[in-house]
Each structure stands twice: as structure tokens, then as C-alpha cells.
Image (tube, rainbow, N blue to C red):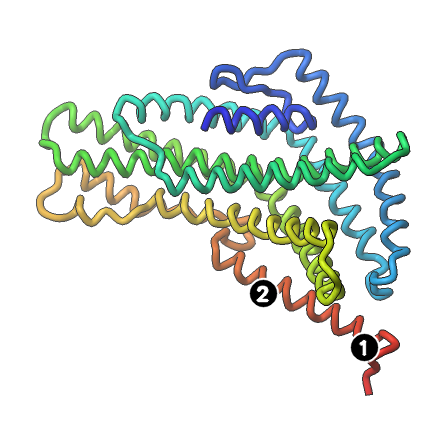
């Protein structure tokens, strides 16, 4: 797991999203990495507006772009640029949180190793799937650069793909942060189940309860801190994804009867994998909330100690409700509602296209 997280951290450093590198399980920052990140940020922020203008002009020339949506590419490009600037400006605050989370994760790994607790296979599969999607989306975007001959166009493609990779890296960092917290909550639940079978009333038992209580409280505060730092970024990134999915869904309907080609298959894979990417973001938040306040029926059967009773009262009052900018809760139901909205809007645009085409007219 550490190797996988280290690769993703190294890629984030390469594109300038962070100035920290993972060394022996610790996040370290040097003057060289600081300077490199600042130079990458300046180049990306400085060149991107001009590149966006050129790319939007090219998009507006294609025949399938509805005339009613002539402002949409400009709005999406402006949105993406503002998200990028906000993400890079917030880099220092986000890096500080990730350093604290990494230190907490190291402490947790030592406790899990000492207790013989393993990461659940479900959580492992989620991390593998998320990492695969992240790697695939970044590789596909950079593979497009290989088809470009002009040196100036290669520079444009590299910068715009760096911006695209930063957006993907943000969602991955958001997922990985809550993934590490969910491991901590799962460890607390596992240790509480072990305490139910041990003799209570001893000093060691009381110390164990207090230690798990402190860890649970620390993980809960870290969850709120992660949500607070990423909240606005995830809100804007979600809106960007919705605009992308609506347009891609509409374009997919236009070419659904066309012969399959490599370009269309790649476009379809990007569409479905980005949808799965956002599903995993919402799903890991739901899993974290479930682990944070998991039902403990076995602990409440029979006689329980006073310390454990007080802890269970505390836990029942500390339910984790993760919201994006305080607007809506993050869970699977929210993602399903968003998917339904996206499909409805894609169909609506397709109907406008049919009504305005030469073959079909509204009577």
C-alpha cells in the first residue's frame, strides 16, 4: 500500500500539486522540491488562459456543437482555470494537513502491526480500483501528446494535461485521505470487539478504552479537517464533472450508430471511468461515516463496564455527517441523483439538436 501511495505522491510532485515527497513513509520537503513546485505552478497558471482560448476556438468549429451552447466551452474553461488557481493557492494548507495525516497513519500502522490487524480486503480493492482509474486517466491524456508534431502544440498539450492531471490528483488525494481515516476507524472497532472478550475492571482495560477513545476523537477531527479543506475544491470539481458528463453523454448519443473506432472507445472509457471515479469519492465518504459510528450489538449484550458504556454514549453522539460546503451530504444516494440529472440533461440537449436539425422539425 505504501508503494502505491508513494507512486501517486511522486506523480503529484511531478505535476506541481505538492512540494512534499514520500521518503520511508514520511513526507519531506526540500528547497529543490519547493522551487520546482513554484516554477510548475507559475508556468501552468501563466500559459493556461491562452491555451484554453485556442482550444475553445477549435471546439466551436465542430459540426455537432449546438449553437445554443456556444458559451458553454468558455464557461467550463473559466471554471477549470479558477479551480486550478484555487487548488494551487491552497497547496500549503493542504500539504500541512496531509503531513499530519501521514504522521497519524504511521502511528496507526504501528498499532495495527502490534495487534496483528490487517486492512480489510474491501478497502484494499477500493484503493486498487481508484489508483487504476487515476493512472488510466492520466496516461490517456498524456498519450494524446504523442500524435502531435508541432513543438508549440506539444507544449500546449503538456500544460493542459498537467492541469487535467491536477484535477484528477485532487480527487485521488481526497479519496486517499478518507481511505486512511476509514482504516483507523476500522481498527478502533476491531479493538473494541476484542475488549468485549477481555476482563474489565483492570487498569490496563481502562487505559485501552481511553487510548481508543483518543484515537477515535483524533480521527473524527481529521475527517472534518479533510472535508473542510477539500470541500470547495470538490464542489467545483463536481460541477466540472457534471458539465463534462452532460456534453460527453450528448456526443455519445450523436455517434451511437457510428462504427466503433479506437478514438470513440477511448472517449467512452474516459466517460465511464470518470463516472466511477466520482462514485468512489462519494462511496469512501459513506464507508468512513459507517465505520466511524458502526453498530456494536455484541458489545451491548450482557454486562459491560462503565468505561465502555461511557465510550459508546460518546460514539453515538459523534455521528460523522460529511457535507460539501454545507450544501449536501456526500453519499451513494447523492451520486445516483447526480447521475440521473446528468442523463436527463444529456437527453434534453440531444432533443434540442434533433429539433434544430434539417431532418427533424417540430410541427
Is the residue 94 above or below the residue 325 in the image?
A: above
Residue 143: percent from left, percent from top: 73, 37
Sequence-first disc among 1 and 2: 2
Q: Which residue is mark 2?
A: 340
Is the residue 255 above or below the residue 172 in the image?
A: below
Residue that extends furthest to the top in the rendered view of this protein? 31
Q: Residue at x 66, y 49 (%)?
A: 270
Q: Residue at x 16, y 47 (%)?
A: 300
For the residues labelled 1 and 2, the Cα–Cα distance comes to 23 Å
Is the residue 21 above or below the residue 314 in the image?
A: above
Q: Residue at x 86, y 39 (%)?
A: 51
Residue 206: percent from left, percent from top: 18, 28
Residue 82: percent from left, percent from top: 74, 41
| Pick the front one: 119 or 136 | 136
Q: Which mark is residue 355?
A: 1
Q: Is 64 displayed left or right of 130 in the figure?
A: right
Quadrant occupied by the C terminus: bottom right
Is the residue 147 above or below the residue 9 in the image?
A: below
Residue 110: percent from left, percent from top: 34, 21
| Pick the front one: 92 or 171 | 171
Residue that extends furthest to the bottom in the rendered view of this protein? 363
Amino acid at each position: 500500500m505504501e508503494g502505491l501511495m508513494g507512486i501517486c505522491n511522486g506523480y503529484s510532485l511531478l505535476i506541481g500539486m505538492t512540494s512534499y515527497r514520500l521518503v520511508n513513509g514520511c513526507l519531506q520537503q526540500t528547497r529543490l522540491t519547493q522551487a520546482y513546485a513554484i516554477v510548475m505552478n507559475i508556468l501552468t497558471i501563466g500559459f493556461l488562459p491562452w491555451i484554453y482560448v485556442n482550444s475553445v476556438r477549435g471546439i466551436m468549429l465542430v459540426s455537432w456543437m449546438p449553437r445554443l451552447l456556444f458559451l458553454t466551452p468558455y464557461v467550463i474553461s473559466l471554471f477549470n482555470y479558477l479551480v486550478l488557481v484555487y487548488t494551487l493557492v491552497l497547496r500549503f494548507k493542504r500539504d500541512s494537513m496531509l503531513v499530519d495525516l501521514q504522521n497519524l497513519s504511521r502511528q496507526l500502522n504501528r498499532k495495527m502491526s502490534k495487534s496483528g490487524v490487517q486492512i480489510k480486503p474491501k478497502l484494499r480493492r477500493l484503493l486498487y480500483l481508484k489508483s487504476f482509474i487515476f493512472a488510466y486517466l492520466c496516461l490517456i491524456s498524456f498519450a494524446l501528446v504523442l500524435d502531435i508534431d508541432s513543438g508549440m502544440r506539444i507544449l500546449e498539450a503538456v500544460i493542459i494535461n498537467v492541469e487535467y492531471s491536477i484535477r484528477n490528483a485532487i480527487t485521488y488525494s481526497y479519496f486517499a485521505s478518507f481511505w486512511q481515516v476509514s482504516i483507523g476507524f476500522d481498527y478502533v472497532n476491531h479493538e473494541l470487539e476484542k475488549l468485549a472478550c477481555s476482563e474489565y475492571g483492570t487498569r490496563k482495560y481502562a487505559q485501552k478504552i481511553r487510548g481508543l477513545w483518543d484515537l477515535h476523537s483524533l480521527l473524527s477531527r481529521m475527517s472534518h479537517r479533510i472535508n473542510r479543506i477539500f470541500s470547495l475544491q470538490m464542489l467545483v470539481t463536481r460541477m466540472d464533472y457534471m458539465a463534462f458528463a452532460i456534453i460527453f453523454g450528448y456526443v455519445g448519443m450523436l455517434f451511437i450508430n457510428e462504427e466503433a473506432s479506437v478514438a470513440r472507445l477511448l472517449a467512452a472509457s474516459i466517460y465511464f471511468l470518470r463516472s466511477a471515479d466520482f462514485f468512489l469519492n462519494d462511496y469512501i465518504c459513506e464507508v468512513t461515516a459507517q465505520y466511524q459510528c458502526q453498530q456494536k450489538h455484541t458489545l451491548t449484550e450482557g454486562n459491560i463496564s462503565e468505561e465502555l458504556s461511557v465510550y459508546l454514549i460518546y460514539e453515538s453522539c459523534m455521528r460523522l455527517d460529511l457535507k460539501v460546503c454545507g450544501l449536501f451530504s456526500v453519499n451513494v444516494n447523492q451520486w445516483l441523483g447526480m447521475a440521473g440529472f446528468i442523463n436527463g440533461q444529456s437527453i434534453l440537449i440531444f432533443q434540442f439538436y434533433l429539433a434544430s436539425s434539417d431532418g427533424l422539425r417540430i410541427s
